[in-house]
Image (cartoon, rainbow, N blue to C red):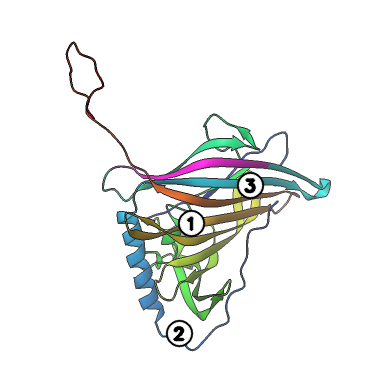
């Protein structure tokens, strides 16, 4: 299954953005890893299929900060948004997941819905990032088991990855840009704790290329007594190669709820319009 990530950039009045994508130091290699790379990828695939098949439609609170930094001018243009973020299936039983936002506040002032207007937005973390390190993507990426270590004082297994030379010719694979990164996996549940990607010379818009990095941190939530691992934080940065501009987007997610539809039946009560039974 092909997946897609995007950093969407809005440039106004010739202004273009900064932000520091969160980086983690890879854990030191270890010879004590008890599971093979193949076994770990299979466990990740099982968790991916469970998420794609069973995660319900849900919504949560999103707090996002989007910046444009002009280092030469020592100026930063920032937009802060608070939104209701939703993940929904295209149809019942389908594995296609769609992301959307309903903006509630912009820079602290009430907003009447609509979409986030940037200056930068990252999409795809909820619907595609889990697929990056998996057996189904082994045709696109070379994986290397780095070993056991820690991520923010938490035990983790790390796997690095890089685009295969043959991926450009495979319509199944993302591309044509070269990508590389690292993923940290919980050694007990084999869910992703964090994944990072680095894309040099990413095409931002016609005539502009940038060093693009992004990272997604995951944490468990429970819907109907079943646990799913979902993003708790996203950070991304795009630093233009030829002009002094940096774009960034950082978001945190909380207060997850299953999206449910409530309905009731109103009966015909004839000429006595009392409160209808529900």
Q: Is residue 176 visible?
A: no
What kind of element bears circle 2? loop
Q: Depth check: give the residue in front, 256 or 171.
A: 256
Q: Is residue 64 left or right of residue 15?
A: left
Give above or below for 126 relative to 185: above
Q: Position of residue 183 (x, y in %)?
A: 50, 68
Q: Position of residue 166 (x, y in %)?
A: 45, 65
Q: Which residue is mark 1?
A: 231
Residue 65's tag is 3
The kind of secondary structure the magenta stretch mainly shows is: strand
Q: Residue furthest bottom?
A: 31
What kind of element bears circle 3? strand
What kind of element bears circle 1? strand
Badge 2 or badge 1: first in the primary sequence:
2
Residue 141's tag is none
Q: Which residue is mark 2?
A: 33
Magenta region:
79-91
Q: Is residue 258 visible?
A: yes
């Amino acid at each position: 299954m092909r997946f897609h990530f995007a950093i969407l950039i809005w440039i106004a009045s010739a202004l273009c953005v900064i932000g520091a994508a969160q980086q983690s130091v890879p854990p030191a290699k270890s010879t004590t890893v008890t599971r093979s790379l193949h076994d770990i990828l299979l466990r990740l695939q099982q968790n991916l299929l469970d998420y794609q098949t069973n995660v319900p439609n849900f919504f949560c609170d999103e707090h996002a900060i989007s910046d444009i930094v002009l280092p030469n001018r020592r100026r930063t243009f920032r937009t802060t948004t608070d939104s209701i973020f939703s993940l929904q299936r295209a149809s019942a039983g389908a594995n296609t997941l769609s992301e959307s936002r309903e903006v509630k506040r912009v820079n602290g002032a009430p907003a009447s819905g609509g979409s986030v207007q940037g200056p930068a937005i990252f999409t795809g973390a909820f619907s595609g990032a889990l697929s990056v390190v998996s057996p189904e993507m082994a045709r696109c990426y070379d994986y290397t088991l780095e070993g056991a270590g820690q991520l923010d004082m938490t035990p983790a297994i790390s796997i690095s990855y890089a685009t295969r030379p043959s991926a450009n010719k495979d319509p199944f694979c993302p591309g044509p840009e070269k990508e590389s990164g690292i993923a940290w996996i919980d050694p007990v549940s084999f869910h992703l704790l964090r994944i990072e990607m680095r894309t040099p010379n990413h095409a931002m818009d016609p005539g502009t290329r940038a060093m693009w990095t992004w990272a997604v941190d995951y944490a468990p939530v429970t819907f109907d007594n079943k646990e799913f691992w979902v993003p708790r934080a996203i950070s991304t940065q795009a630093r233009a190669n030829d002009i002094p501009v940096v774009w960034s987007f950082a978001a945190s997610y909380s207060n997850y709820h299953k999206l449910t539809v409530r309905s009731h039946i109103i009966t015909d009560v004839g000429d006595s319009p009392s409160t209808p039974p529900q």
